[in-house]
Amino acid sequence: MTAATGRILTQAAPAPHPRRRYDLHPPGVVYLITALFLAIGALNSQNNLLFWAFGLAVGGLIVSGFVSGSALMHLHLQREPTPPAHVGDRVFLRYTITNSARIWPLFGLRIEEVQAGHSDAPPIVCAPGGVAHIGPRQRGSASVRALARVRGFHSLQTVCVSTTFPFGLVRKSLFFDLPTHVTVRPAVAPLRSDLAARIAPTRQDASLARPRIGQGGDFFGLREYVPGDPVRTIAWRPSARRDTLLVRQNTTAAPPRLWVQLDRPSPDVPELDFENAVALVASIITHAARRGAAPGLLIDWAEVDLPPVASQASASRMLDLLARLDRSGQAGSTRSNVRPDLVIAYSDARPGAAHINGANVRTWAAQEFLAVVPPPQHRRRRRWWRPAR
């Protein structure tokens, strides 16, 4: 929960038509009951002191409900774009708060996401955040911590900003309709060391090299000199024969390609096995991209055919497609001429016998997810009364 304020030069555009609501806070209910007892005692005893106490109680209720509520109406809220997240990650939903009032400051603001229709188990669990103070004509930033639980393309609609300042009796709330979408990618887990070495080997096989312009030592071809080319790349003898400057181009070994295919899930496949299979594909793609390999994704039953490209942008695109992958909306199968290097199935597979970048296709099973991904190691905390050895 952080906030940073500063003098603003231009006012931010307010969200369209925020809704306002007043609620009695639990301390406010106790306060109101106490005020009623004071009123009954003052009427029965005609004691001036009780009348004064009842008047102060009503005055405090009015100040808490209306005076501070008018200052809240000068609040404007804007939502900042949310980057993609992975299942199990903790993300921050960020907002920009502007106080356009000239005199009244804002204190004790509470910010929370209103998720209608997901009261039991929402796909994104959001914890409330807040800002302690925003002065007149100032702008502040706030963040709300959220936990991505379910893979998919989820929407967030309404943001509630409330305060119980000054006495904590009445909660004043503003509801802003700020629709946005959050892409939750599959969970990415580290692979076992021996299996990860087969996906992206440290030394590339010579048979995988293709003619590609680079900084290697093998000759690729000649081209005409362009101003700015290094002098050491000029081929002097061919240049003398053709009476023009020619530049020597070399080849470099292309990164190893890895085609990953996800099998079609049958109706009897449990949902956990399907999610494990999608998470396993995402882990393989992420690991291969980090090690310099070129991963490709083939899901024929969902009409996904992304060629291998050695770039983080291509890996991010594959993870976004996996985030929106739906097993119920299966399209017609299309035959592909691509021979996959690794097939992710759901049963009857031995992950230890997988062979990457080979002639034979092997499979990894979603049921053996714990055998492919090493279990997390929990460190035991040493008791404070036990001395270190």
Image (tube, rainbow, N blue to C red):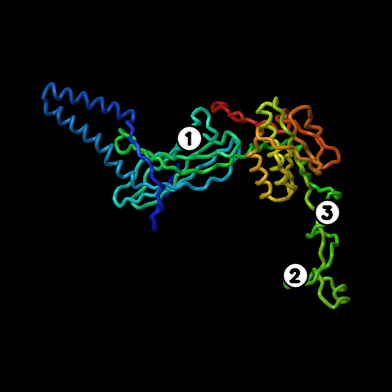
* Residues tagged 2 and 1 counted as in contact (Cβ below 8 A): no
Query: Which is nearer the N-term, disc 2 or disc 1?
Result: 1
Which residue is drawn at the image coordinates 78% and 38% (left, top)? 342
Which residue is drawn at the image coordinates 11% and 24% (left, top)? 46
Q: Is residue 184 above or below residue 102?
A: above
Query: Which is nearer the N-term, disc 3 or disc 2?
Result: 3
Q: Which residue is the extreme one toward the front?
A: 332
Q: Residue 167: x percent and y percent? A: 29, 35
Residue 384 in which image quadrant:
top right
Q: Amino acid at mark 3?
A: Arg
Residue 169 in which image quadrant:
top left
Q: Amino acid at mark 1?
A: Gln
Q: Which residue is the extreme one toward the bottom?
A: 243
Q: Secondary structure at mark 1?
A: loop
| Numbered marks: total | 3
Q: Amino acid at mark 2?
A: Asp
* Mark toward the viewer: 1 or 3: 1
What label does residue 115 carry, if any?
Answer: 1
The answer for how far apart the CA atoms under marks 3 and 2 are is: 24 Å
Front position in the image: 174 or 257: 174
* Mark toward the viewer: 2 or 1: 1
* Residue 224 relative to residue 103: left or right: right
What label does residue 229 carry, if any?
Answer: 2
Q: Secondary structure at mark 3?
A: loop
* Mark toward the viewer: 3 or 2: 3
Q: Residues within 10 Å of mark 2 (few under 14, many from 20)?
A: few
Tell me the residue that label 3 is attached to.
210
Q: Residues within 10 Å of mark 1 (few under 14, many from 20)?
A: some
Q: Is residue 376 above or below residue 309?
A: above
Front position in the image: 189 or 324: 324
Image quarter (top left, top right, bottom left or bottom right) of the N terminus: top left
